[in-house]
């Protein structure tokens, strides 16, 4: 996948995901969406954290979490922080992290699909499916 195709794939998938988030009534943003009881706030903060981690890796920066953690342990580590945020704060983090990963990808022509797909479009699609299923239930 070429550099521009990677950027385009992120943009396209993000637009669908962001539209889905915007379709959720404000009165429901703290309801449990996933089987693990994550709310829309938690999903927003979770994706923001992984986007920032991907940007850090591309830039060669050290990870913010303790080393040696599994994916589930990383998620739990970050969930503890996210659960203290308001929905608006988590959404602001999501917007900022998304702008950051987009800029890093655009500024890094050597970026590869494997560097971003799991933390961007695959992640939007995964949690977008959770949100869709929850809204349809």
Image (spheres, grey):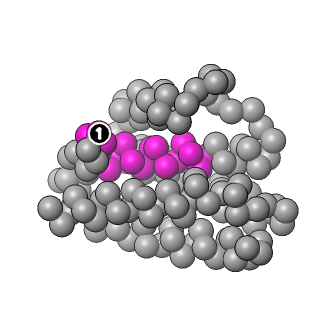
Magenta stretch, main secondary structure, is helix
Residue placed farthest to the right in the image? 110
Residue depicted at 58% across the width and 26% down the height: 69
Q: Quadrant of the C terminus?
A: bottom left
Element at badge 1? loop
Q: Is residue 88 magenta?
A: no
Name above or below for residue 110 compared with residue 35. Answer: below
Q: Nearer the viewer, residue 53 or 94?
A: 53
Q: Quadrant of the N terminus?
A: bottom right
Q: Nearer the viewer, residue 5 or 106?
A: 5
Residue 112 position by quadrant: bottom right
Residue depicted at 71% across the width and 55% down the height: 115
Name above or below for residue 29 compared with residue 121. Answer: above
Residue 122 location (% of width, % of height): 52, 61
Q: Residues within 10 Å of mark 1 (few under 14, many from 20)?
A: few
Residue 114 location (% of width, % of height): 70, 58
Q: Is residue 7 visible?
A: yes
Q: How many numbered marks are there?
A: 1
Residue 85 location (% of width, % of height): 38, 35
Q: Give the extent of the magenta segment.
A: 36-52
Q: Is residue 103 visible?
A: no
Which residue does the numbered mark 1 point to in the structure image?
A: 36
Residue 129 position by quadrant: bottom left
Relative horizontal placement of residue 56, taking residue 110 as reference (left or right):
left
Residue depicted at 18% across the width and 66% down the height: 136
Q: Nearer the viewer, residue 93 or 77?
A: 77
Residue 134 position by quadrant: bottom left
Name above or below for residue 80 compared with residue 19. Answer: above
Name above or below for residue 92 compared with residue 113. Answer: above
Residue 38 location (% of width, % of height): 31, 42
Residue depicted at 66% across the width and 57% down the height: 116
């Amino acid at each position: 996948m070429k550099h521009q195709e990677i950027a385009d794939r992120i943009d396209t998938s993000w637009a669908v995901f962001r539209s889905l988030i915007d379709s959720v009534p404000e009165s429901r943003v703290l309801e449990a969406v996933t089987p693990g009881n994550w709310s829309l706030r938690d999903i927003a903060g979770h994706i923001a954290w992984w986007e920032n981690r991907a940007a850090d890796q591309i830039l060669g920066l050290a990870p913010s979490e303790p080393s040696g953690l599994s994916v589930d342990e990383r998620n739990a580590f970050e969930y503890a922080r996210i659960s203290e945020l308001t929905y608006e704060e988590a959404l602001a983090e999501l917007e900022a992290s998304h702008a950051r990963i987009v800029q890093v990808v655009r500024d890094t022509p050597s970026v590869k699909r494997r560097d971003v797909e799991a933390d961007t479009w695959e992640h939007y699609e995964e949690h977008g499916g959770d949100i869709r299923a929850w809204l349809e239930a």
